[in-house]
Structure formats: structure tokens, C-alpha cells
Image: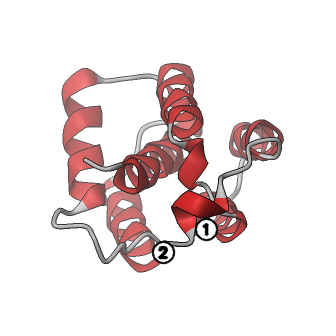
Amino acid sequence: MNPLQSLHLAIGELAFAVALADGEVQEEERKKFHSIVEAELRCKDFDFDVSYIIFQVMDKHKSDVETTYNWAMDEIKMNSHYLSPELKKTFISVMLKIARAYPPVTAEENALIERFKKDIEPLEGDPVFYQK
């Protein structure tokens, strides 16, 4: 997996953490999650289904929100040289759409999104990498 794909997988996991923040992810939430991730995170270099992989990993490991968040942020920081301003906006948008997909948006979901905005704000990619 290349760094850009790793970033997309990490935001997919963060989006899953948002969906999980208000309790167990229901079947209807899974369908909406898949649709949002597919529409928003479609990367021309992907030869795999991001949302399918995320659900397989999360179902197998039964990770909690905090563990998932920390893993994904570590992955984003490690590959941040590919993090363009546009990609940051897309990632925030995905998290917001996931939270709004299954109303109501809970305090836990809002807190996780605000935490993400704060954590991603200082990360700046290198145009040499993301403008290829």
C-alpha cells in the first residue's frame, strides 16, 4: 500500500470510529458508511474496496473508538507528507457526513470530530509529494 492509500485507509478507520462513537454500528449505518466512503474516498490508485477492508478489520479485532483513533492518527502523521490541504478538507467532510448519516449527531461524535480537526490542523503535506 502506498502512502496515499494508507491515508485513505486511516480516514476510513476514523470515520468508522465516528460511527462507533454512539454505540454499535448498525446494518443501515454500514450501508451509509460504505456509500459515503466510496463516494468521497474514491482514489484512482485503489484496486480495493476501502470500506469493506475497514469493516473486516474492525469486526475481527473489535477495536474501541480510542484505539482506532490513535492508530489512524499515527498512520496519518506517518504519511502526512502526502496530506494536501484539499485532502484534509475531504477527510473532515467524510467524518461530518458519517456523523450526520445516522441522526442524531451525538456529543461523542462531535467531540471526536473536533479532536480530529485540532489534531490534523498542524499537519502540512509537502507539495512535492501531493502535486504529482
Q: Position of residue 64 (x, y in %)?
A: 46, 22
The residue drawn where x is 23% and y is 35% is 57
Foreground residue among 96 and 83: 83
Horizontal side of 58 relative to 41 (left or right) equals: left
Count the marks: how many? 2
29 in relation to 79, above or below: below
Horizontal side of 93 relative to 130 (left or right) equals: right
Can the viewer see residue 21 in this picture?
yes
Find residue 128 and report its image quarter. Answer: bottom right
State how far apart marks 2 and 1 are (Cα). Answer: 10 Å
The residue drawn where x is 71% and y is 37% is 108
Looking at the rendered structure, the kind of residue marked 1 is: Lys
Q: Are marks 2 and 1 in contact (CB under 8 Å)?
A: yes
The residue drawn where x is 51% and y is 50% is 15
Q: Position of residue 63 (x, y in %)?
A: 38, 23
Foreground residue among 78 and 116: 78
Neighbourhood count class around disc 1 (C-alpha, 10 Å): few under 14, some 14–19, many 20 upward: some
The residue singled out by tag 2 in the image is 40
